[in-house]
Amino acid sequence: MTARTFIYGRMVADTELCQLIGGTDNPRIFAKKSMTSSVEDTPYIVYKMGNSTAEGLSERDDPERQYFQVWVHDYADSETADYAKIDEVITAVKRALLVDGNEPGLWMINFLETSQDLNDDTLNTVFRYLRFQIIKKEN
């Protein structure tokens, strides 16, 4: 299993997270550049995989460390833009990505940081992002 499929699978499998972003039938979770429109119902999540680096710990087992980001967007209207809703989604994302150490091929996911409040004038959204790193035993 790749890190990308694991991360997406964990988010879409989390019922509480999906209820916050469109329901379990149509969760609005997109890989970077996979959105089909710049106008999406909000809130929605976009995730992007970053660089992956071999740890070089042994010749037999060579885990990799890969960074990834999760952006949580909400509509930027003075009446509906709400960082509190974004904060709810962020809490649910962090919970969905908790790893108990029993996942095959995976050691851990480290939560690194959450951004300040941001806005995107092109998409007409307010957003925040989360940064993580995932450490995999195998590709």
Image (cartoon, helix red, strand yellow):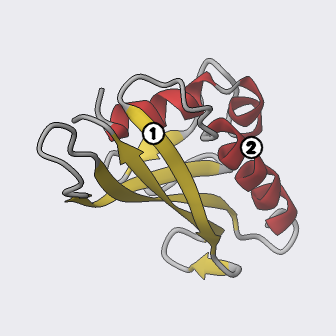
Query: Amino acid under label 1?
Result: Trp
Residue for badge 1 = 107
- Residue in view at x 76 percent, y 70 percent: 77
Up-down relation of residue 69 to residue 77 (above or below): above
Please tell me whether mark 2 or mark 1 is closer to you in this view.
1
- Residue in view at x 19 percent, y 48 percent: 58
Give whichever of 62, 68 is nearer the camera. 62
In primary-sequence order, the first of circles 2 and 1 is 2
Binning the other alpha carbons within 10 Å of mark 1 as few (below 14), some (14 to 19) or many (20 upward) gives some
- Residue in view at x 35 percent, y 29 percent: 105
Which image quarter holds the C terminus? top left
Which x, y percent locates residue 31? 38, 46
Residue for badge 2 = 92
- Tell me, yes or no, if residue 12 can be seen here: yes
Question: Where residue 95 is drawn, which disc sits there?
Answer: none
Binning the other alpha carbons within 10 Å of mark 2 as few (below 14), some (14 to 19) or many (20 upward) gives some
Q: Relative to residue 40, is residue 54 drawn left or right?
A: left
Q: Secondary structure at mark 1?
A: strand
- Tell me, yes or no, if residue 37 can be seen here: no
Residue situated furthest top in the rendering = 25
Which x, y percent locates residue 60? 15, 37
State the image quarter where residue 87 is shown. bottom right
